[in-house]
């Protein structure tokens, strides 16, 4: 029996697969490599010494999806695939609704057809919209402020309806806060195809000289220094949260939602300063206007995950910065972009 990981070649997916392989699970990866690269899976293989089966398809390709489920005995699914840039979702909402909702529905239909009813779903703290207070708990009102967040919220509602219709399902909804950092080996990290949408990879690309300066989007928020405050979590801690959620799914039925965060908020300027201090590199930056859909402050109350999943984030902001810089300094432009074409992707790594 295998665990299917959709979007497995991406930033969170590749780190999650490492922890799953280290925990002894057999892994199948589904990824269309639209914002990721086969090279990352080769590096996962090098780090773990374990093989995985890879399908280079899009979730909207129903014949390909049918092939994945018919050829394999799948025990559970970790669904990470999806477009994730808040700003782009505001500019291109139909693209996000088509990809994130239609692809996810096709996946759930295949799971139902083949009686695969164990699911870990990658949601987001964006489903909370602008919270009235912080830290944010799972039972807070939900109101996404951008199309990306709304796609996550809609999928959550679909999953609630699905579970109500069939209580044999076991579903964990994981609401991520802001994953940063990289695998301590320096071999796996965040490697966006274009200019980064997230803060820390933007910082590291400035540090390595690929970009001239960091644009800080908004310095007029009601925060201590005017820049947005977020809960930054090390991607390895986040990956381990998926393993814990999967263990829960495999042992029982039900639907539960968990925040995956540290419970601490850091401003954009505090992250810049932490990176400069720990890595010894000055980061040139300028202030730009706020991005549509962004909010002022967001950080988690992760107590539920700690109590029910026996999981908590342990890595410091300094570790997040050091690991991010190790990854970026070891991987200059293009290093992780080998084997982009589908015909070059091997069936296993």
Image: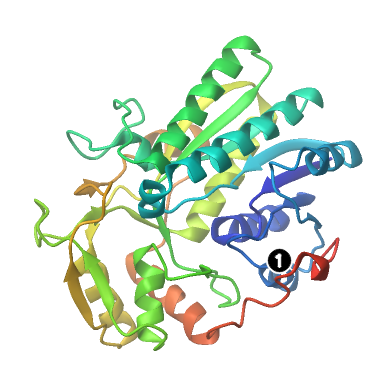
Quarter-wise, where is residue 110 in the image?
Answer: top right
Where is residue 13? Give x, y as percent. Answer: 61, 55
Q: Looking at this rendering, what residue extends furthest in the right direction?
A: 71
Q: Residue at x 32, y 85 (%)?
A: 212
- Can you see residue 319? no
Which image quadrant for residue 198?
Answer: bottom left
In the shown orientation, is residue 213 left or right of residue 255? left
Q: Which sits in the foreground, 162 or 52?
A: 162
Image location (x, y in percent) of residue 233: 40, 56
Q: Residues within 10 Å of mark 1 (few under 14, many from 20)?
A: many
Q: Residue furthest top?
A: 165
Q: Residue at x 67, y 47 (%)?
A: 6
Q: Quadrant of the C terminus?
A: bottom right
Quadrant location, the N terminus: top right
Residue 171 x, y percent position in the rendering: 59, 28
Hey, which quadrant is residue 77 in on the image? top right
Q: Residue at x 25, y 87 (%)?
A: 282
Can you identify the residue that label 1 sits on? Answer: 41
Q: Nearer the viewer, residue 60 or 116?
A: 60
Colour scheme of this structure image? rainbow
Count of picture labels: 1
Is residue 268 positioned above or below 237 on the image? below
The answer to whether residue 321 is seen in the rendering is yes
Task: Give the side of residue 208 with respect to residue 272, left or right.
Answer: right
Residue 134, compared with residue 264, is above or below; it is above
Towards the viewer: 299 or 148: 148
Q: Position of residue 28 (x, y in %)?
A: 78, 50
The local secondary structure at tag 1 comes to helix
């Amino acid at each position: 029996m295998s665990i299917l990981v959709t979007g497995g070649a991406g930033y969170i997916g590749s780190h999650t697969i490492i922890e799953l392989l280290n925990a002894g699970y057999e892994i199948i990866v589904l990824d269309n490599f639209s914002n990721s690269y086969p090279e990352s899976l080769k590096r996962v293989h090098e780090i773990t010494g374990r093989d995985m089966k890879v399908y280079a398809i899009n979730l909207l390709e129903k014949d390909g999806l049918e092939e994945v489920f018919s050829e394999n005995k799948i025990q559970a699914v970790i669904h990470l695939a999806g477009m994730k840039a808040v700003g782009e979702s505001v500019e291109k909402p139909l693209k996000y609704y088509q990809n994130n909702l239609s692809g996810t529905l096709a996946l759930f239909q295949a799971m139902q057809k083949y009686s695969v009813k164990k699911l870990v779903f990658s949601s987001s703290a964006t489903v909370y919209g602008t919270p009235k207070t912080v830290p944010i708990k799972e039972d807070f009102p939900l109101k996404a402020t951008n199309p990306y967040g709304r796609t996550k919220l809609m999928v959550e509602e679909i999953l609630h309806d699905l579970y109500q219709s069939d209580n044999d399902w076991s579903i964990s909804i994981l609401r991520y806060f802001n994953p940063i950092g990289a695998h301590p080996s320096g071999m796996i990290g965040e490697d966006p195809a274009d200019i980064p949408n997230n803060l820390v990879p933007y910082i590291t690309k400035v540090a390595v000289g690929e970009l001239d300066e960091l644009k800080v989007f908004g310095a007029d928020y009601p925060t201590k220094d005017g820049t947005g405050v977020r809960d930054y979590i090390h991607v390895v801690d986040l990956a381990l949260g998926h393993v814990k959620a999967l263990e829960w799914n495999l042992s029982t039925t039900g639907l539960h939602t968990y925040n995956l965060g540290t419970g601490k908020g850091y401003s954009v300027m505090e992250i810049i300063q932490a990176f400069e201090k720990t890595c010894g590199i000055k980061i040139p930056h300028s202030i730009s206007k706020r991005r549509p859909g962004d909010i002022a402050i967001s950080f988690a109350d992760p107590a539920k995950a700690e109590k029910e999943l026996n999981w908590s984030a342990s890595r410091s902001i300094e570790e997040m910065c050091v690991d991010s810089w190790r990854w970026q300094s070891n991987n200059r432009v293009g290093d992780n972009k080998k084997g982009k074409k589908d015909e070059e992707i091997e069936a296993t790594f």
